[in-house]
Amino acid sequence: MTEATTTAGHIPPILLIGCGRMGSAMLAGWREQGLAPSVAVDPSPAAAAFAGPDLAVVAGPEAIAPDFVPAAVVLAVKPQNAAETLPAYARFTGGSVFLSIMAGRTIGGIARLLGPDAAIVRAMPNTPAAIRQGVTVACPGQGVGTPQRALCDRLLHAIGTVAWVEDEAFLDPVTAVSGSGPAYVFLLAELMEQAALEQGLPPALARLLARQTVAGSGALLAASAEDAAALRKAVTSPGGTTAAALSVMMKSDAWPLTVSEAIAAATRRSRELAG
Ligand SMILES: NC(=O)c1ccc[n+]([C@@H]2O[C@H](COP(=O)([O-])OP(=O)(O)OC[C@H]3O[C@@H](n4cnc5c(N)ncnc54)[C@H](OP(=O)(O)O)[C@@H]3O)[C@@H](O)[C@H]2O)c1
């Protein structure tokens, strides 16, 4: 098998299948590093806007030039489109690594569509990828070589931080924590806004305070070497306002139980949906 290679400062030819929100976010990051002539397949008329000197956008696999040899085939279609979409790309098995960001599609399930010899990396990004602040967990399938793994790592770094696991079973709790996690944080902003209204603040101010407090606290956490508990304790004076709020939130049957049960439910659902 010929393994893909990559050098710093240059992204080798990529075949991107699906140029929607996540596919186009990755593409933007690759372009910043310099993308070798690549191809995106997407039947959506909106995808044509991504065409350029470094990228041909085609509507289907039959329009890919026969002599195009991608270093990686990036699978960024919706999971429900996998069965109808993937078999047409089985011909790239052997020379290219397949990098899937499809939620819930297992390495085994993808291999059933591409063939047993396909080198597959399964990854779970999250939605802050849109501003390159995502976190992605990647898992290599059998037969993925070191240069192929390094290439996938570079491709995923285009949308944020990357961590690798060797055990694919971890991707269910990963999905529950980071894949679904942005929704939990957005819910916190929603609830804080509602509570601010209940306390009599005008709507525009309630919205500003809730959004900017969540966003600013996330940025502070990202910039700090301290863990979240230490940052929380640093802003909690004994007997003060923060302590009054936390005494409600931190009751054992309040946030600790709710968050634990929520992430357990999402992990179970991820296992149920896997295929
Ligand atoms: N967005 C996230 O936060 C997130 C997080 C984790 C994982 N993911 C995964 O990332 C993948 C992409 O998600 P997304 O949010 O980017 O979805 P999206 O915006 O809907 O993008 C998917 C794109 O694929 C196109 N498409 C449909 N059928 C195709 C085919 N046969 N060949 C090539 N392209 C085709 C769609 O076109 P049409 O619109 O015309 O159908 C659309 O442009 C999904 O598998 C999802 O599970 C996304």
Image: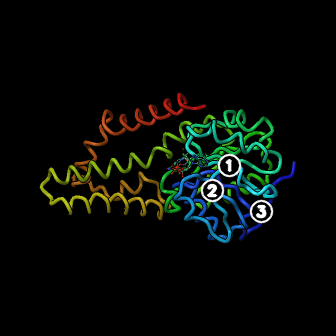
Residue labelled with disc 2: 156
Q: Is mark 3 within 8 Å of ligand 1?
A: no
Name the amino acid type tagged 1: Leu
Label 1: few (<14), some (14–19) or many (≥20) C-alpha neighbours in 10 Å: many
Q: Which mark identifies residue 99?
A: 1
Q: x%, y% of residue 81?
A: 58, 40
- In the rendering, at what x and y percent does residue 52 appear? 63, 69
Q: Is residue 234 above or below residue 188?
A: below
Seen in the picture, residue 224 relative to 171 is either above or below; the reply is below
- x then y, percent, for residue 229: 41, 51
Q: Is residue 118 left or right of residue 189?
A: right
> Which label sits on residue 6?
3
Name the amino acid type tagged 2. Answer: Leu
Amino acid type, residue under disc 3 in the picture: Thr
Pick whichever, 188 or 87, lies toward us. 87
- Chain-order first, disc 1 or disc 3: 3
Residue 170, picture quadrant? top right
Choose between 235 and 180: the one closer to the eye: 180
C-alpha gap between disc 2 and disc 1: 9 Å
Q: Secondary structure at mark 2?
A: helix
Distance between the Cα atoms at labels 1 and 3?
15 Å
